[in-house]
Image: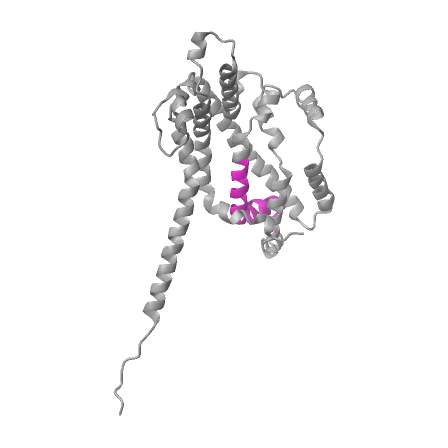
Amino acid sequence: MAAAFPTRTHRPLSQLSRNKAQLILHAVMLSITVLFLVPLLVVVSASFTDEIALTKNGFGLWPSQFSLDAYNYVLLDPSQILRAYGVTTIVTLIGTVLGLIVMSLLAYVLFRHDFTWRRPMAFFVFFTMLFNGGLVPTYILITQYLKLRNTLPVLILPYLVVPWFVFLLRTYFLTLPKEFVESAKIDGANEWQIYRHIIMPLSTPALATIGLFCILMFWNDWWLALLYIDEPKLYPLQYLLFAILRNAEFLSSNTSASAMLASTQPPLQTTRMAMAVIAIGPVAIAFLLLQRYFIRGITLGGIKGE
């Protein structure tokens, strides 16, 4: 009789193979993450590098000659930067909250199949994605009729409704179970209660994604300030940094300046890097807070709609 031997199992080997595959995958993703961080590190390093050393040695991950000249020039008047930060923060917070409310309400109307004017309103919203009134008529409307020049609302109202974001929200609403809405209507809930207590809680990923887009849009905008803001106390951060950079470029290209002025020319390249570091901080924090929703929300445009 043949001796009975214990049967050899391959489970530990397969588990080991899976662990090795996961380890390799994590190493690859970590390497890709480091590669994505390299440009940011280069920008930060360049902002702390002396202008002459940067021109001579080029960009690197570590300052070849440490200097705070760029930050000293950008922060020459700290109160001005802080005031611009305040203006941008207020505009971003108010604009994002109001934008999400208005666009989600509009998307909810377009999502309801029993709304008679749903298709005409959808066409009207879509039409604004293709055509607009033009820069001159818009400028006349805002400055002459609405009297919004040199006011904070002029930095918010033009971006309050973005048609593309409205359609993204509507597309997400279409994926929600219709039984929830029908059950709420049977229980006697009105449209506002359905919107507030059913649609909004179920749409957190979509709202967080659109909210992040709105934050980026309001925080990075300088175009509206260029058109409608003349008072320095109302300058948003991006436009103030644009004005500082424009002044630095003018001083650097002014060949008729005196020898004393030429010796105190602002560091142009490192100033650009310092401006990027100053402006990117809050946006990076917002992305870190919303990234778990952003990963799911980037697929909004691929969901089938009607």
**203 magenta-colored:** yes
Q: Is residue 145 above or below residue 37?
A: above
Drawn side of residue 253 relative to residue 134, left or right: left
Which residue is located at x 70 percent, y 38 percent?
130
Seen as rendered, the residue at the extreme front is: 56
**Residue placed most toward the observer, 52 or 44:** 52
Residue range in magenta is 188-215
Residue 195's spot in the image, x, y percent? 59, 45
Which residue is located at x 38 percent, y 55 percent?
24
The count of marks equals 0
Q: Is residue 53 above or below residue 265?
A: below
**Residue placed most toward the observer, 303 or 24:** 24
Residue 201's spot in the image, x, y percent? 52, 47
**94 magenta-colored:** no
Drawn side of residue 52 relative to residue 159, left or right: left
Which residue is located at x 59 percent, y 22 percent?
226
Q: Quadrant of residue 53?
A: top left
State the colouring used for the structure image: one colour
**Residue placed most toward the observer, 40 or 94:** 40
Main SS of the magenta segment? helix
Residue 101's spot in the image, x, y percent? 58, 38
Which residue is located at x 60 percent, y 45 percent?
168
The answer to whether residue 201 of the structure is visible from this angle is no
Q: Quadrant of residue 150?
A: top right
Drawn side of residue 172 relative to residue 124, left or right: left
* Quadrant location, the N terminus: bottom left
Residue 156's spot in the image, x, y percent? 58, 29
Seen as rendered, the residue at the extreme bottom is: 1
Q: Is residue 230 above or below residue 114?
A: above
The answer to whether residue 139 of the structure is visible from this angle is yes
